């Protein structure tokens, strides 16, 4: 008779030991592969793989597969819920990241190269990026909860494996992408378009461009292009940037997914012996998941996930137990999770993320964030060939520059110069993407009435393009209306915004709009709404980082964001006078 699988297997003590060793071995492999520990790469990896192999063998010999799978369920389930929740907190931001991957030179170039499909494109998915972002968030949370409670585990294990393979492919693509390489891209242009005529002309002299076919309607062009590498996979949205100051590097993201693939593999192996949790097991799994979620919440500086995990897991179990004939099953739990996720996502999309991780969140010091970049440190090495001995010799930059004999071609032949990064550079949190500017020919009375504008013109009378990034953040008090798109913005509260502008003007408080629009669109907006406020231009990407709402109202005092409102929550003038605006 086949023995029933249990957590303790043949030995509770030995299986606990082997599981701990297995996790430690995995940790050694991951740590040893990090660039910060490259000097210990061989040692850490040798020890890690040996421990992994021995502990895995021990787990199988002592029948500890179920125990290892349970540990994996806690880690995978908790991380999936938190990861999905962080993306769901800002689905628009996650959609922006997906759009980067869907652009023609990004993820699609792998298919072009691997399968010889130069015409392949993912551009058609860009319009569906937000829908896909929302679906991915919800699926992550559902799978995370189900794997914790042991619901539909066979189906869940397959879906987890497929999702992790997809995510790992994305992070592998991001980590291995080389913008210096080229790939063959095929584009089709209308024959009468200017770009088509330009490509036809360029093809006559440029070997990288080839006209594949030309008809009365269109021209098909093959062209060698550089990949568009995505520097940040967006695994945790802006949460890590906003909490610890940086996102995971592409290689760190890849290793994070490799670890998850490994843990999902154990769940997959044990899918036939994992049963839905008993009441006692639910208590243990919930406590373990809450402990791990608390640790992640401490990292992100956001404690809402703790309550969400508790509510999602307990709510799913309650529906399963009390849902009656139709909902008293794990599909009822799935429906419950879809409802609560949809309500949460609906709220943050109508207003703004529950936790704002952007560099323009309330309380952020914009002056600091514009100057928190770090200059990198590079050490150069020169590789020369000694003509007498025929050997390659390496010299530091200092030694090379101080010894003129090394420069003489009769003694040495220059082979290469290698740059070793000792300290990686880091761009400031707020870069040039936030840079309100205006061409002097577009200045109107509205802009000229601002003190910081008139002063800058006096200091720089010959400049034709004026930037006001530093002046804006150093104002004693300024109100900024950030508008991503003038045409599609929600202007239902334009009269309320106008009343705030009038009050600010009466109290000598600067009020400006920044947008990414043509001068004709700006003039039309002013005329249509009878709203002659100062308007400056700004990069569209920078506007997206300020706020997801279109428009968004910010109040900045001495460089610190004191308040931030989506268009649906813009308060009245009286409320602002009492609570935010200084007299």
Image (tube, rainbow, N blue to C red):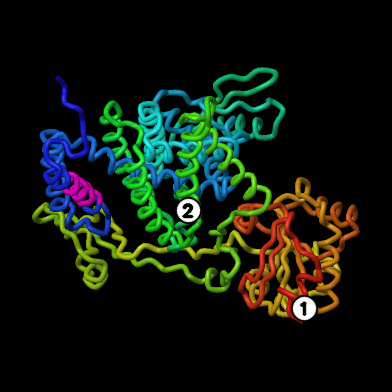
Rounded to the nearest angstrom, the CA distance separating label 2 from label 1 is: 45 Å
Q: Position of residue 119 (x, y in %)?
A: 52, 25
Q: Along the line of sight, which residue is nearer the eye, 361 or 159?
A: 159
| Residue that carries the numbered disc 2 in the rendered image | 305
Can you see residue 209? no
Q: Is residue 437 magenta?
A: no
- Say which residue appears at 41% left-offset and 23% top-offset: 115
The answer to whether 157 is drawn above or below residue 466 in the figure is: above
Magenta range: 19-30
Q: Is residue 366 left or right of residue 240?
A: right
| Residue that carries the numbered disc 1 in the rendered image | 451
Secondary structure at badge 1 equals helix
Q: Is residue 544 left or right of residue 461?
A: left
Secondary structure at badge 2 equals helix
Q: Is residue 169 left or right of residue 436?
A: left
The answer to whether 86 is drawn above or below residue 402 in the figure is: above
Q: Is residue 348 left or right of residue 381?
A: right
Q: Earlier in the sequence, mark 2 or mark 1?
A: 2
Q: Along the line of sight, which residue is nearer the eye, 386 or 511?
A: 511
Secondary structure predominantly adopted by residues drawn in magenta: helix
Q: Quadrant of residue 61?
A: top left
Q: Position of residue 406 (x, y in %)?
A: 21, 64
């Amino acid at each position: 008779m086949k023995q029933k699988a249990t957590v303790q297997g043949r030995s509770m003590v030995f299986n606990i030991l082997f599981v701990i060793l297995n996790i430690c071995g995995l940790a050694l492999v991951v740590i040893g592969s990090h660039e910060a520990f490259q000097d210990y790469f061989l040692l850490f990896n040798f020890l890690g793989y040996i421990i992994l192999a021995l502990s895995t063998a021990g787990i199988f010999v002592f029948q500890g597969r179920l125990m290892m799978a349970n540990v994996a369920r806690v880690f995978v389930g908790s991380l999936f819920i938190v990861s999905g929740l962080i993306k769901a907190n800002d689905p628009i931001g996650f959609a922006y990241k997906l759009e980067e991957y869907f652009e023609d030179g990004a993820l699609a170039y792998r298919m072009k190269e691997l399968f010889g499909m130069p015409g392949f494109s993912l551009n058609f998915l860009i319009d569906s990026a937000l829908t896909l972002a929302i679906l991915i968030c919800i699926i992550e949370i559902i799978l995370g909860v189900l794997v914790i409670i042991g619901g539909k585990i066979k189906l869940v294990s397959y879906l987890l494996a497929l999702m992790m393979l997809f995510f790992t492919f994305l992070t592998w693509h991001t980590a291995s992408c080389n913008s210096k390489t080229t790939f063959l891209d095929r584009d089709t242009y209308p024959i009468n378009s200017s770009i088509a005529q330009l490509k036809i002309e360029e093809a006559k002299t440029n070997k990288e461009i080839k006209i594949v076919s030309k008809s009365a309607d269109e021209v098909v062009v093959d062209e060698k292009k550089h990949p568009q590498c995505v520097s940040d996979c967006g695994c945790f949205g802006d949460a890590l940037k906003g909490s610890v100051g940086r996102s995971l590097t592409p290689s760190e993201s890849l290793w994070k997914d490799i670890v998850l693939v490994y843990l999902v593999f154990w769940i997959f192996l044990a899918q036939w012996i994992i049963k839905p949790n008993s009441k006692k097991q639910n208590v243990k799994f919930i406590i373990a998941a809450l402990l791990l979620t608390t640790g992640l919440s401490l990292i992100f500086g956001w404690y809402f996930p703790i309550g969400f995990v508790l509510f999602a897991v307990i709510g799913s179990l309650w529906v399963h137990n009390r849902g009656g004939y139709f909902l008293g099953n794990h599909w009822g739990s799935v429906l419950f999770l879809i409802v609560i996720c949809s309500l949460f996502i609906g709220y943050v999309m109508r207003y703004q993320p529950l936790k704002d991780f952007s560099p323009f969140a309330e309380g952020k010091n914009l002056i600091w964030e514009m100057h928190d970049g770090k200059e990198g440190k590079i050490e150069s090495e020169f590789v020369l060939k000694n003509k007498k001995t025929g050997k390659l010799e390496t010299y530091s930059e200092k030694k090379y520059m101080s010894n003129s004999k090394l420069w003489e071609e009769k003694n040495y032949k220059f082979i290469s110069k290698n740059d070793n990064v000792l300290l990686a550079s880091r761009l400031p949190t707020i870069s040039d993407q936030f840079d309100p500017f205006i061409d002097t020919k577009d200045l109107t009375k509205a802009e000229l009435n601002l003190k910081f504008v008139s002063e800058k013109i006096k200091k720089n009378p010959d400049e034709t393009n004026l930037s006001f990034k530093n002046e804006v953040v150093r104002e004693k008090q300024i109100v900024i209306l950030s508008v991503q798109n003038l045409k599609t913005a929600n202007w239902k509260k334009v009269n309320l915004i106008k009343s705030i502008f009038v009050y600010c003007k009466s109290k000598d408080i600067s009020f400006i709009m920044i947008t990414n629009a043509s001068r004709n669109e700006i003039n039309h907006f002013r005329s249509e709404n009878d709203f002659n406020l100062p308007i400056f231009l700004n990069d569209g990407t920078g506007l997206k980082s300020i706020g997801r709402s279109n428009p968004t109202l910010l109040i900045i005092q001495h460089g610190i964001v004191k308040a931030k409102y989506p268009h649906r929550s813009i308060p009245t003038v009286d409320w602002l006078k009492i609570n935010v605006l200084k007299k």
